Amino acid sequence: MNPNLSRLHPYPFEKLSKLKAGIELPDHLPAIALGIGEPKHPAPEFVKRVIADNLDRLANYPTTRGLDELREAIAAWATRRFQLTAGTLTADAHVVPVNGTREGIFSLVQSVVDRSRPGAKVVSPNPFYQIYEGAALLAGASPHYLACDESNGFIPDFDQVPASVWDDCQILFLCSPGNPSGAVIPRSTLARVIELADRHDFIIASDECYSELYPDEAQPPEGLLQTCAALGRDDFARCVVFHSLSKRSNLPGLRSGFVAGDARILREYLRYRTYHGCAMPVQHQLASVAAWQDEAHVQANRAAYRAKFEAVVPILKQVMDVDFPDAGFYLWPRTPVDDETFALELAQTQNVHVLPGRYLSRTIDGYNPGEHRVRMALVAPLDECVTAAERIAAYLRQR
């Protein structure tokens, strides 16, 4: 067996199940799940129709490179959304469809990491989406964690990272808007990171799967390729981004996303994928074309999340240190007791389920930036989210 399998950590939800094993839940209160970031808004009807109308495509092998019309739809969407110079992000050279961001992130790391270089590092924010770490470990690299906490606005202070770390870095993961904080990395910081990548020769991989969930329609979050365009880097050198229909379009089961950016990186990545064997089913590709070409359902999605934040945050602010995030669908409040105790007691007394922050982080030099915080995903219907907030407030007042 691959010896690096033994280095993998249990997933956060495995830890949560272990924490709650054997406890009794109040059966007079319906369960409300805020722990898992699985969208619960309805999938767009027009997307479902495309799948149903193309079920005969089950008889066709999909290509790894994807349908021309899918890559063209993605390139057109990204060019519009991120104000790219026309014609610079091409369907042929700069876009690769993937089966959701998790699969794309994992496979990109396997194809990029040079195991012959001693001390290879994959640098990641902390807290983080656990696939960054797992992909690094299974590629034979060592993760290096950059703490994201209130002191730095939940965005790493890249200038405090030693040059020796950057010299060993092969991939830097960004997550903007952040999971779990919702923090959006500004253009000035993205430009600084690009400068570091040029100087130390590493790849920037920006996970932007929450980029389409934001409160102000006039101020969408900046993306890494958008910063490249603003800097005149129309080749997107050393930069790749990940996007998905899971959160944007409430289609987590479609497993549809893309990687876009540096053509040199993506050419070799596509070579890897032809052996990896993970092409998206044709009917899912056609459904994805329809989703990327429509914005009305995305605007409605944002409005639904906006309504939940506006209803829930004022209730929680009465009893917790919490505020509106820059973007995304998570709250990342500080807890008045340790995060495991909070999650356990909340489940036992209120049948509301949240994720302890320490499960999304690693303890480095005795410090875990996720401790005394919990992640709450406002994915349930509005009335359930309000009920959950009221129960959380009742729990803390009773406590």
Image: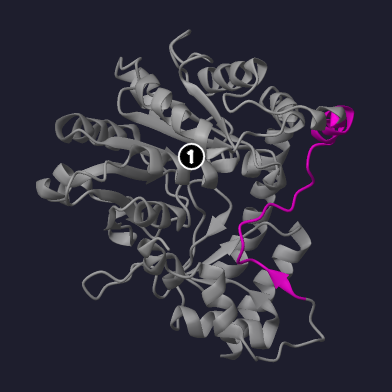
Q: Residue at x 56, y 82 (%)?
A: 18
User: Residue 112 placed where, x, y %?
Assistant: 34, 38
Instruction: Determine the image quadrant of residue 200.
Output: top left
Instruction: Determine the image quadrant of residue 396.
Output: bottom right
Relative vertical location of residue 33 with respect to residue 380 in this rendering, above or below: below
The quadrant of the picture occupied by the C terminus is bottom right
Q: Amino acid at mark 1?
A: Glu
Highlighted magenta segment, given as a residue range: 31-55
User: Residue 118 placed where, x, y %?
Assistant: 16, 49
Asked whether 34 falls inside the magenta stretch, the response is: yes
Does residue 124 appear in the picture of this structure? yes
Q: Which residue is mark 1?
A: 208
Q: Residue at x 15, y 31 (%)?
A: 199
Q: Residue at x 71, y 65 (%)?
A: 386
Does residue 318 appear in the picture of this structure? no
Dot 1: element: loop
